[in-house]
């Protein structure tokens, strides 16, 4: 409190907090929050204005946690705070760096994915040129090569279009979209950077042509966020054979699609497993991540009518996504 308010170091010690540092308009709310903590309910992200020595208010973001004795009885509370302006400024810097890093990873994956059709197109065009140099030109074969090059251009155009949509909100497609195709596309997009860093990325996709409601970009953003989270965990753990396995299937009643992303990066402590989708929660070292990737993933999945959850046992962590199949899709499967 001395550092935040500018009063002498000894002055805040033992001082009644609400009367010494809070404006009258803030005291009732703060006392209510403290009472909740004393009753055993932790309060996170509580915002309050603190009066400085000059009388100017400073906004503080508090986490107030009940402290229990050996018998489990609440014996007091612990309050951690940070100035809002400093917190938001540092968070903004980290978020911007995350955005840059994410774009770099996305660009690297896109370059890897675009390289294959580009190489095929180059070979097809060279082959067509060689055939045109012959005295007797087989027009059908040349046309066939040019058609192949045009097909590769179409594939590249589709990749670029998805990258263009990736950075903005996209409306749901009428009739839904094929989830299996998007799963394969995301794995292909991420595989390049995974392989470059010695991580094996495998997929077992049994979705077939089943469709879900929404826009492909929603699940692309979700899968890329979850894959990126797994990649960072593995890079930090540096265990033996590092791997991520993506599995996708339809439930026996043909009502839902399930996606599972499993890594062997050391697991997540059971005490924080229910917090990993909360905004700004992160188990990573300071300055590397502010914990927004999985929060965004949950928002996107819930917008599609689905759920996302994380479980961890031993050295493995599994993120499972459940999405409802389109009604017409599920009914046709059941009747068949």
Image (tube, helix red, strand yellow):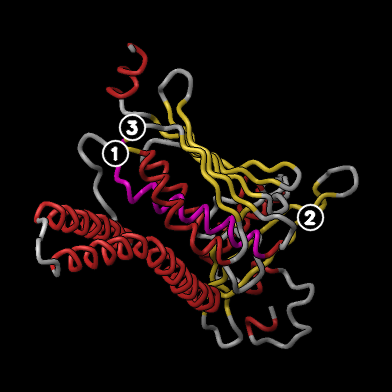
Mark drawn on residue 209? 3
The residue singled out by tag 1 in the image is: 177
Q: Earlier in the sequence, mark 2 or mark 3?
A: 2
**Residue on which disc 2 sits:** 76
Q: Mainly helix, strand or loop, the magenta region?
A: helix
Q: Nearer the viewer, mark 1 or mark 2?
A: 1
Helix, strand or loop status at disc 1? strand
| Between discs 1 and 2, the one toward the N terminus | 2
Residue, far right: 70
Q: Nearer the viewer, residue 310 or 14?
A: 310
For the residue carrying disc 2, how many other residues have a C-alpha within 10 Å: few (<14), some (14-19), or many (20+)?
A: some
Mark 3 and mark 1 lie on one chain; the one further toward the N terminus is 1
Side of 37 relative to 107 (left or right): right
* Residue 289, above or below 315: below
Q: Position of residue 317 (x, y in %)?
A: 65, 46
- Residue shown at the point (38%, 32%) measured from the top left: 208
């Amino acid at each position: 409190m001395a550092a935040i308010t500018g009063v002498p170091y000894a002055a805040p010690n033992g001082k009644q907090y609400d009367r010494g540092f809070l404006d009258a308009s803030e005291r009732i709310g703060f006392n209510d929050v403290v009472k909740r903590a004393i009753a055993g309910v932790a309060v996170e992200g509580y915002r309050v204005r603190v009066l400085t020595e000059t009388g100017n208010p400073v906004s503080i973001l508090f986490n107030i946690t009940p402290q229990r004795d050996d018998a489990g009885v609440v014996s007091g509370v612990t309050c951690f705070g940070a100035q809002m302006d400093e917190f938001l400024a540092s968070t903004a810097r980290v978020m911007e760096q995350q955005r840059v890093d994410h774009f770099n990873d996305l660009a690297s994956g896109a370059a890897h994915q675009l390289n294959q059709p580009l190489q095929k197109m180059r070979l097809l065009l060279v082959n067509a040129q060689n055939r045109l140099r012959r005295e007797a030109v087989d027009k059908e074969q040349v046309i066939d090569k040019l058609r192949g090059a045009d097909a590769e251009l179409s594939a590249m155009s589709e990749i670029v279009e998805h990258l263009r949509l990736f950075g903005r909100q996209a409306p749901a497609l009428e009739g839904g979209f094929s989830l299996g195709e998007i799963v394969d596309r995301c794995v292909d997009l991420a595989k390049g950077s995974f392989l470059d860093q010695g991580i094996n990325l495998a997929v077992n996709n049994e979705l077939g042509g089943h469709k879900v409601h929404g826009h492909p970009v929603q699940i692309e953003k979700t899968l890329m966020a979850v894959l990126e989270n797994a990649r960072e965990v593995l890079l930090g753990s540096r265990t033996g054979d590092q791997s991520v396995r993506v599995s996708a299937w339809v439930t026996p009643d043909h009502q839902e699609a399930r996606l599972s992303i499993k890594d062997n990066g050391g697991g997540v402590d059971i005490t924080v497993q229910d917090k990993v989708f909360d905004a700004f929660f992160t188990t990573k070292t300071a300055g590397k991540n502010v914990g927004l990737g999985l929060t965004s993933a949950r928002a996107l999945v819930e917008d599609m009518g689905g759920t996302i959850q994380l479980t961890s046992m031993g050295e493995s962590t599994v993120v499972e996504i459940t999405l409802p199949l389109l009604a017409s899709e599920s009914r046709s499967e059941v009747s068949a």
